[in-house]
Amino acid sequence: MLAASEHLTPYAKATARRLISVLSAYAAYDPEIGYCQGMADLAAPFVALIVDDVEAFWCFERLMRRTRSNFSHNSEGVRSQLRMLGRVLEHKDHVLMHHLRHVGAGECLFAYRMVLVLMRRELSLSNCLLLWEMLWAEDVQQERSLRRLLEQNAD
């Protein structure tokens, strides 16, 4: 199929093959989730920036640890984050939230894609990676706090 895509440059075809490879490997690695629409948005930056496909896969896998529930069959991860967005909007801008409810957008479904792909389509690559780095830093901080708590309770 890619070979017949004459509009793509050889580099774009090679990158697309690598992306397919990473996503296929992930689907085999986590068959419960498999491949879902939106995953390519999350994997593409790793494939574009990391030459080694194995490293790109493991970076993508690490990101999926945070976002895996977004891709479950019931989309509970996304739904939970949309509820949180609604609570934040209610607290920070009650007038806006009232308007959203009035027009039938109180469930914040307009932000579904933004949440699903962690703003990848809404931000430039550099700004998106900056956001992702902040999320990863938060994850590391939470892991360290949990580790300290477990060590304290083990004594």
Image (cartoon, helix red, strand yellow):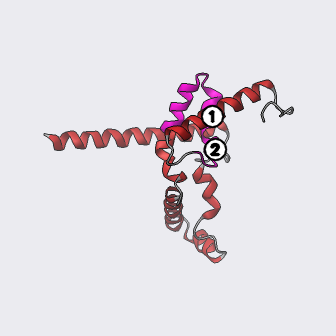
Seen at 63% across and 54% down, the residue is 113
Question: Residue beneath label 1, please?
Answer: 45
Q: Quadrant of residue 25?
A: top right
Position of 104 relative to 124 (above/below): below
Q: Give the residue type at disc 1.
A: Pro
The earlier-in-sequence mark between 2 and 1 is: 1
Q: Where is residue 130 in the image (x, y as percent from the top left)?
A: 56, 37
Q: Which residue in the rendered view is the most extreme toward the left? A: 155
Position of 66 relative to 83 (above/below): above
Secondary structure under tag 1 reads helix
Numbered range of the magenta stretch: 35-62
Question: Residue beneath label 2, please?
Answer: 120
Q: Where is residue 81 in the image (x, y as percent from the top left)?
A: 51, 58
Seen at 56% across and 66% down, the residue is 93
Badge 2 vs badge 1, beta-carbon distance below 8 Å: yes
Magenta stretch contains residue 37? yes
Q: Which of 82 and 74 is in front in this view?
A: 74
Seen at 63% across and 47% down, the residue is 38
**Is the C terminus in the top left, top right, bottom left or bottom right quadrant?**
top left
Q: Position of residue 46 (x, y in %)?
A: 60, 32
Task: Measure how far apart labels 2 and 1 are at the Cα level.
Answer: 9 Å
Q: Which residue in the rendered view is the most extreme toward the bottom? A: 102
Magenta segment, principal secondary structure? Answer: helix
